[in-house]
Amino acid sequence: MIKINSELKMPLYQQIYEQIKAKIIAGAYKEGMRLTSTRELARDLCVGRNTVENAYGQLCLEGYMASRPGSGFVVLNVIDDLLPLSLKTPAREISDLPTGFVPSGKKADRSSHNLFTEYKYDFHYGSLDHTFFPYSLWRRLTTEALSSFESQNVNYYNDKQGELCLRIEIMNYIRESRGVRCTPDQIVLCCGTQYALDLICALFPEGNRKVAMEEPGYSGVRIVFEKNNYEIKPIPIGPDGMDISKLKKSSARLTYITPSHQFPTGVVMPIQYRAQLLQWAAQRDGVIIEDDYDSEYRYHSRPIPSLQSIDNHGRVIYLGTFSKSLAPGLRMSYMVLPEWLLDQYRSVFEGYHSTVPWIEQKAMSLFMAGGHWEKHLRKVCLKSNKKHEILLHEIRRQMGDKVRIHSHNAGLHILLEFLNGEHQERLIEQAKEHQVRVYPTLQFWYTKECCRKNFVLMGFSKLTEEEIVNGIGLLNKAWFNFSNYYR
């Protein structure tokens, strides 16, 4: 029996979602069981049908159930013994932490400003709209940090893992938003994801120097592994994310993955495949690096729970960043290490110091502790959602059935597929002739000959709504006017 309480602050659709998910995990709803239709359940609960459809849509997105023609919504298989207690019981509160703890998101390949000066409209991925950053508030918080008693810390080499007050704020945030289970001791502040990966590579100096990576996947990560003398094992991406069967056949014991919004395809890995991935790691004595680079940006559903949140065996290293939601120029990211790796980390990096300036850490801590972070996220998500909708609307209105949009409904980029097989190099040149910049996808493929060349990548976070409309208009003219279309 599904029950809802209108007095709770939790949205009605989320109450329905949570109860059905709990029943599936507990085994009360068996695999193949047909669920009540959205119309019937809405009538029984006296709620709008959209409310039930939103709950069912989230469950389908996460892989707990599926919509089957002629059968309605049916329960999918979930490997229950791989699911942790965190999905069945609330995450630990601050009071559960060890004594002494006091409570208080791929990337641009080039950062030069000149990158954007040759083009009238640049659909660059990785840079943010400068109006998003809270300049006045950040100045005030920086002044507050420098005026505090702790400001003397700017004269010292500080904790290599980062300021404790900030690590506590990050712990609170990722526990509530992503279900990540950790203590502040497991969090390490880093000056970007690539630096975090350098640290991870140093934690495994001997043995199996092979890493399984998504194909296609983020090229900036591949560079780090190659420079650390890792052999890359490309694993194809399918409709459910990384092909686990191919992963099992590889000899790698380390894998890098973006399961909640695969870069660049946008595929979401369903719960049962996540469980299989964790099973692989436990059996192989492997380690999974989960890059949760843009989990804040989901436009038509709730964020997908992190892989780390359903990890029973401490096989996941979780990576997060402030680059996609606050400012890439701050160079502030973090990783969450499993407890069994902490001694190795402390030994390998004994004598190291933090790479993130104290003043920025303190300002960020004040930003989060004061409730500004949640407000900022709501603001940027609403604005990004509006840009995202305008982008999709204009592409569909102006280009129609000549293209297919991939990687939408989340994140800050899309992939555009050209259905007549146009080559991305020519498409990019045609766009450049009209002072618009779009980007290739070839660099994301380790095996270049496997790349489908009729795709381009387009980010939208840097452009204004008006610029998006005008830019799409010029692209439509560049790609689909009579003379270009039949070249």
Image: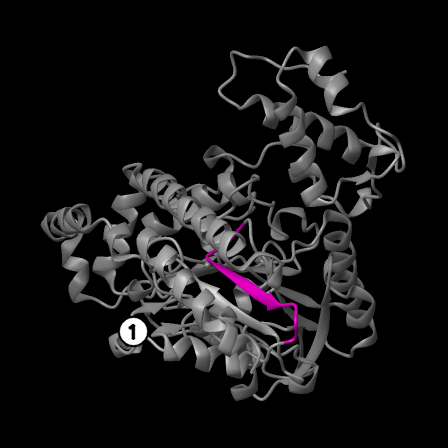
130 or 404, nearer to the observer: 404
Horizontal and vertical percent position of residue 78: 81, 44
* Magenta segment includes 12: no
Residue 150 in view in this figure:
yes
Quadrant where the C terminus is found in the figure: bottom right
Horizontal and vertical percent position of residue 13: 60, 25
Q: At 77% across and 48% down in the image, what residue appears?
A: 82
Vertical relation: 379 (above or below) 131: above
208 or 352, nearer to the observer: 208
Q: Is residue 278 left or right of residue 15?
A: right
Q: Secondary structure at mark 1?
A: helix
Q: At 79% across and 56% down in the image, what residue appears?
A: 276
Which residue bears the numbered disc 1?
A: 116
Residue 224 in view in this figure:
no
Quadrant where the N terminus is found in the figure: top right
Number of on-image labels: 1
Vertical relation: 310 (above or below) 124: above
Horizontal and vertical percent position of residue 414: 52, 60
Where, by quadrant of the figure, is residue 340 drawn? bottom right
Q: At 42% across and 61% down in the image, what residue appears?
A: 472
Q: Is residue 189 left or right of residue 283?
A: left
* Magenta segment includes 417: yes
Vertical relation: 314 (above or below) 113: above
Where, by quadrant of the figure, is residue 469 drawn? bottom left
Q: Amino acid at mark 1?
A: Phe
232 or 443, nearer to the observer: 443
Please state the extent of the stretch shown in magenta in the rendering. 410-421
Within 10 angstroms of label 1, few (less than 14), some, or many (20 or more) residues?
some
Q: Is residue 201 left or right of residue 211?
A: left
Horizontal and vertical percent position of residue 387: 40, 49
